[in-house]
Amino acid sequence: MRLAIALILAGAATPALAEPDLAMIARITDEAMNHGEVIDTAAYLTDRIGPRMTNSPGMRAAERWTQDRFKAWGLTNVHTEGFDFGRGWSIDSASVTMQSPRRMSLRTLPVAWTPGTPAAGITAPLIIAPMKRPRDFAEWAGKLKGKIVAISYPRAPRDADKPAFERLDSAAIDKLDAYEQPVTAPDTGDGWFKYLQFGKQLDDFLAKEGALGWVRMSYRDNGLLHGEGYQHRDTPKLPGLELTAEDYRRLVRLSAGGEVVLTINSQVKFDDSDPNGYNILADIAGSDPKAGYVMAGAHLDSWVAADGAADNGAGSAIIMEAARILSALKVKPRRTIRFALWSGEEQGLYGSANYIERHFASRPANPDPVKARLSYDFKLNQFPIEKKADYNLLAGYFNIDNGGGKLRGIHAEGNFAAVPVLQGLLSPFASMGASAVVATPTGGTDHEFMSAIGLPAFQFIQDPLDYETTVHHSSVDTFDHLRPQDLRQSAVILASVLWETANADKPLPARPLPTKPRPTDPFHVADPDKKD
């Protein structure tokens, strides 16, 4: 009832929405449910190719395979677009062994883009020297020579205070439908910049002090590992490894009572053959070249702790399945439908940011040359925004990147004019559990920078499953944590939404082109520990 009222009220101020093409939606559903390949695609990306960190051998294999699949399914204009990223990096093997006070193998993972050790490893005493700001260095100056340094503050175990696995109910979705006023502060983004800089500062300090390597503590309990690292442009000097929280705490306790000796062994490879990352793009051509295009995307890259199944093999498989479905049905949309598999998302949305700069709009470079080199994030406060050729051609962008849970609706990203249109697009899917359009924005993925320049770009709401509690970036991000029925449901909805948007009389409404905002938080004080 609420949806019907909303549509009636919206109709008083906006053009009437076209009726959904229910016959086409029925065909899409049949193709997905009875002839689908999304499970096969997800399994190939995860079980066979495995982790796909940007510019790694796994990512190169995925770049080739996904293009081959798009071509085999009959898509056109299948191509890559490259962007400057940095070195490739991959893991051959890693181990950490406690030699004394007793011999024990510890659970570990190299931190991304750190160098390896000699083949025999490094054996040295451990020192517990937690540091998280440059001002912490003074306490440890002169004490680290010849040591393996434990750099994390030993966080105590935490009680689990929410379900490990969750599907959203209507009350949880309703809570998302709350408009969040944007807050602008003079140092917006500085927390992320300081975090990136500290990794380099710490590595420089440890090397200068004569440390041999370092270990850090996993940020999750229960034996989970992650291994994220962000120095793909400036290779660290020292090997670094992550330990499970439980093993790290054991080392801290033992060090309090006497010397602990570790052997760390990290065998990794760098690849400098091609510094470019590559987005994969493929089209279903539209009948009206002047009508522009509608687009769907997910990031193909992953972290390296596991197989990148929920993050974001699932989203990539859904994008590919929507492309396969529509091509198999031999559709002839009015607008071109473009499918994008982004690269470099995990290190700062590099791939989608490059597509924006190349096709949609540009911002002035950040005046800080270090920030300008590190990430597109540091352009977000730079104005004016200059439109490019495709800005007015994008009829809508839909992103999938919050795990393998089924689609439950769409984040409207503060785009009020788009709400009734999005509700109309989702109206056939209430029985599948996907009918919500909520005001709360969501960030940290590839629609974000498009939305930030006013484009009609949206992220789907998804059932969390165990994404945030267990799987996200972790050593158990494998196919087992996907749900086949959810992937099929998502492919039906995405293919249908793309078909409807591609044939709509008008593009999805865009927001005003942003201009430089005034600071809006009179009480703002910079938090040195916050990662924006």
Image: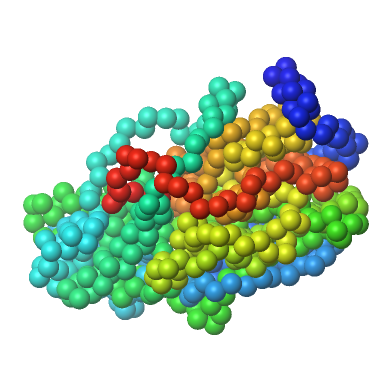
Image coordinates of residue 304 in percent, x first then y, are 48, 61
**In the rendered image, is residue 279 in sight?**
no
Query: Which quarter shows the N terminus?
Result: top right
Q: Is 291 situated left or right of 317 in this image?
A: right
Depth check, front residue: 361 or 91: 361
**Image quadrant of residue 121?**
bottom left
**In the rendered image, is residue 287 in sight?**
yes
**Image quadrant of residue 23?**
top right
Image coordinates of residue 256 in percent, x first then y, are 10, 51
What's the coloring here?
A: rainbow
Picture residue at 37% right of the left edge, 60% below the top:
193
Depth check, front residue: 459 or 380: 380
Q: Is 168 situated left or right of 280 in this image?
A: left
Please tell me how many numbered marks the rendered image carries: 0
Image coordinates of residue 74 in percent, x first then y, are 85, 62
Picture residue at 54% right of the left edge, 74% below the top:
84
Image coordinates of residue 420 in percent, x first then y, are 73, 32
Depth check, front residue: 440 or 142: 440
Picture residue at 45% right of the left edge, 51% below the top:
474
Depth check, front residue: 192 or 230: 192
Q: Is residue 16 above or below residue 125?
A: above
